[in-house]
Image (spheres, grey):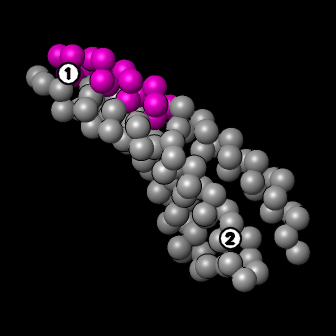
Amino acid sequence: MGKGFGTAALIFGIICIPFGVAMTLLSTVFSMGGIWSLPLEITSFLSLLGWLIPGLAVIFGLIGIIVDDSKGRAIAGFIFGFMGLLIVFVIHIIFENIFTPLVP
């Protein structure tokens, strides 16, 4: 069938870790309040973007594993996307539970 889904999964997988971490950190910092606070809609959108890119890598990776002829890119994109989801989850938990109570 081709290599389209595997290529898309690999592209999303490569960019998901730095992009997901950056969006999660920005949404957490901007939602803490104080001088750097932003409206809830913007911080929610940043958080959603942090979860969306790794999720797309996982979804395209699964579709690529099922449909594509060459499965190497799809497997790599799936693994990167799954690692991105785990990293974003851990960073979200760390910042929400450790650093948010420190802000007055």
Kindly indicate whether the residue at mark 2 contacts the one at mark 1 (C-beta within 8 angstroms): no
Say which quarter of the image contains residue 15.
top left
Residue at position x 61%, y 39% in the image: 87
Question: Which residue is disc 1 drawn over?
Answer: 68
Q: Amino acid at mark 1?
A: Asp
Quadrant (top left, top right, bottom left, bottom right) of the C terminus: bottom right
Quadrant (top left, top right, bottom left, bottom right) of the N terminus: top left
Residue at position x 53%, y 38% in the image: 84
Q: Residue furthest left?
A: 1
Q: Earlier in the sequence, mark 1 or mark 2?
A: 2
Q: Which residues are magenta?
A: 65-82
Asked if residue 12 is among those painted magenta in the image, a careful observer would answer no
Residue at position x 68%, y 66% in the image: 29
- Residue 6 percent location from the top left of the image: 26, 28
Considering the numbered disc 1 on the image, is that residue within a helix, a strand or a loop? Answer: loop
Asked if residue 77 is among those painted magenta in the image, a careful observer would answer yes
Name the main secondary structure of what is drawn in magenta.
Answer: helix
**Other residues around mark 2 within 10 Å, as few (<14) / some (14–19) / many (≥20):** some
Query: CA gap, disc 1 to disc 2?
Result: 41 Å
Q: Does the image show residue 62? A: no
- Residue 60 percent location from the top left of the image: 32, 34
Taking 76 as reference, is 34 above or below it?
below
| Residue 66 located left or right of residue 30 | left
Q: Amino acid at mark 2?
A: Ser
Question: Which residue is disc 2 drawn over?
Answer: 31
| Residue 16 located left or right of residue 64 | right
Residue at position x 33%, y 33% in the image: 10
